[in-house]
Image: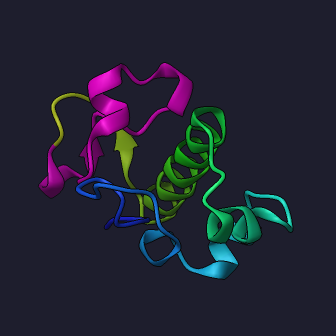
Amino acid sequence: MSMSDLADADRFVGARLPNRDLLNLHVTDDFLEHVREGQLDSLLKEVLAEACHEAWRSIKVEQGWTYGEPTDSSKKVHSRLKAYADLDEEGKEATD
């Protein structure tokens, strides 16, 4: 499951973001206004990426997944099921 459609994007646009309800859990009230204005800096992108990862992680845990390596769908074990800050750069860029 993907929380957004940003992985293969060549630019950051609102249409590729998670739904409004999910965003509202993790960003400020004026976030979408900034998106429309095109004023997302790298720090804000990182904050959004972390929020999306944490939302994804929460859903996985609710579905019974646990952290482990290697990822094994049949056992509901995922190697990126840890805090965003603990992921390496490859893990932060992954989309599956």
* Residue 4 drawn above or below residue 46: below
State yes or no: residue 76 in magenta.
Answer: yes
Q: Which residues are magenta?
A: 72-96
Relative depth, front residue between 53 and 93: 93
Locate residue 87, reporting x and y percent.
41, 24
Locate residue 69, reporting x and y percent.
21, 28
Q: Is residue 25 left or right of residue 58?
A: right
The residue most toward the right is 29
Q: Residue at x 76, y 58 (%)?
A: 27
Q: Is residue 20 left or right of residue 81?
A: right
Q: Is residue 16 left or right of residue 83?
A: left
Q: Residue at x 31, y 31 (%)?
A: 91
Locate residue 3, reporting x and y percent.
43, 65
Q: How many marks?
A: 0
* Residue 68 drawn above or below residue 44: above
Give the colouring mode of the picture: rainbow
Quadrant holding the C terminus: bottom left
Q: Residue at x 55, y 24 (%)?
A: 85
Relative depth, front residue between 56 and 27: 27
Q: Residue at x 60, y 59 (%)?
A: 38
Locate residue 33, reporting x and y percent.
75, 70
Q: What is the quadrant of residue 47 in the picture?
A: top right
State yes or no: residue 87 in magenta.
Answer: yes
Quadrant holding the N terminus: bottom left
